[in-house]
Image (tube, rainbow, N blue to C red):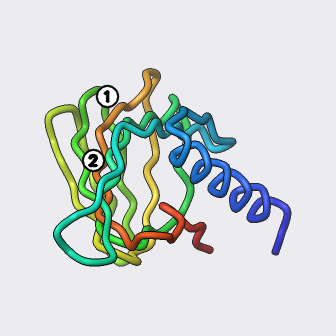
Amino acid sequence: MDRKMTQYAGALALAGLALASGTALAQAGGLTRTLVSREDTSVPGREAVVAKVEVAPGAHAGRHTHPGDEISYVTEGEAELLVDGQPPRRIKAGEAFVVPAGVVHDAHNPGATPVRLVGVYVVEKGKPLASPAP
């Protein structure tokens, strides 16, 4: 694993710890997730994680996947959603998007102000919220 990927993997591991403890964590890539709620769902083995997410100006979230679906609503700013196999998509405040489980994606904030969103992740219990992707 190269140095950059090792750093990213470490940042994601710390993000998982931060979510578990209910704290905010600024990651090397300019992404911050703050846990709002973590609750069981009606589907056995799944939980819903709700987080406030911020992508700093000029930053990328980093290519990653989730062990379940991501459903997000942009509350401030504008970002470029980069989903493998799809053309880049501009998303702005007032819009939402869904990324299916296991799909590699990234977000880029090309602007001069932070992008803020509410992310809802319906994921497998006991797995990291996000895993780095090549």
Residue 57, image x and y in percent?
A: 51, 29
Which residue is at the front of the view, 10 or 125? 125
Which mark is in front, 2 or 1?
1
**Residue lying furthest top:** 113
Above-or-below relation of 38 to 51: below
The image quarter in which residue 97 lies: bottom left
Secondary element at tag 1: loop
Image quarter (top left, top right, bottom left or bottom right) of the N terminus? bottom right
**Helix or strand or loop: what does disc 2 sit on?**
strand
Residue 37 placement (x, y as % from top left): 34, 42
Label count reads: 2
Q: Toward the viewer: 1 or 81?
A: 1
To which quarter of the image does residue 124 belong? bottom left
Amino acid identity at mark 2: Arg
Drawn side of residue 45 relative to residue 111, left or right: left
Kindly identify the amino acid type of the residue bearing the numbered disc 1: Gly
Residue furthest to the right? 3
* 2 relative position to 28: left or right: right
Pointer 2 residue: 90
Query: Residue 59 placed where, x, y %?
Result: 55, 39
**Label 1 sits on residue:** 77
Q: Which of marks 2 and 1 is nearer the N terminus?
A: 1
Q: Which residue is drawn at 29% across and 39% down?
A: 118
Between 46 and 76, the one lying in front of the other is 46
The answer to whether the residues at label 2 and label 1 have Cβ atoms under 8 Å apart is no
| Residue 64 x, y percent position in the rendering | 52, 65
> Is 31 situated above or below 112?
below
Which quarter shows the C terminus? Answer: bottom right
